Amino acid sequence: MYKAIIPATDWYFAHPRVNEQERPVVWNLAAWGLKEDGEVIGLVGAFGPQHAAEGKTPHLVSVPPVAGAYLHRSQLTPVELEQATKR
């Protein structure tokens, strides 16, 4: 459960792929979530064709549990910025 959720405008979570020769994965954060224990985590939208087929509603989830970094848009490399524009 979250104590608070606030917008994360222009914030991203970037991480390398398993094959580091491939372009990184860049998630556009929808919000920051403040957990009961005081930890702040990035939240991303989670909704796709499978969710729709299952009758689920769009919702937010934490970023994947992989090594990566929260970055402001101004900190993204050109490659990360290009990846950030993909859906």
Image (spheres, rainbow, N blue to C red):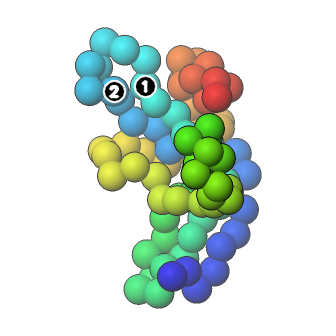
**Cβ atoms under marks 2 and 1 closer than 8 Å:** yes
Count of numbered tags: 2
Q: CA distance from mark 2 to mark 1?
A: 6 Å
Quadrant housing residue 19? top left
Q: Residue 52, image x and y in percent? A: 65, 47
Q: Which mark is residue 17?
A: 2
Residue 65: x and y, percent?
33, 52
Please tell me which residue lies in front, 78 or 43: 43
Please tell me which residue lies in front, 24 or 54.
54
Give the position of the C terminus as an image quadrant.
Answer: top right
| Three-letter code for the amino acid on which mark 2 is drawn | Arg
Above or below, 43 against 83 in this view is: below
Q: Residue at x 47, y 87 (%)?
A: 36
**Res. 11 in view:** no
Q: Which residue is mark 1?
A: 24
The three-letter amino acid code for the residue at tag 1 is Pro
Label whose residue precedes the other's in the sequence (2 or 1)? 2
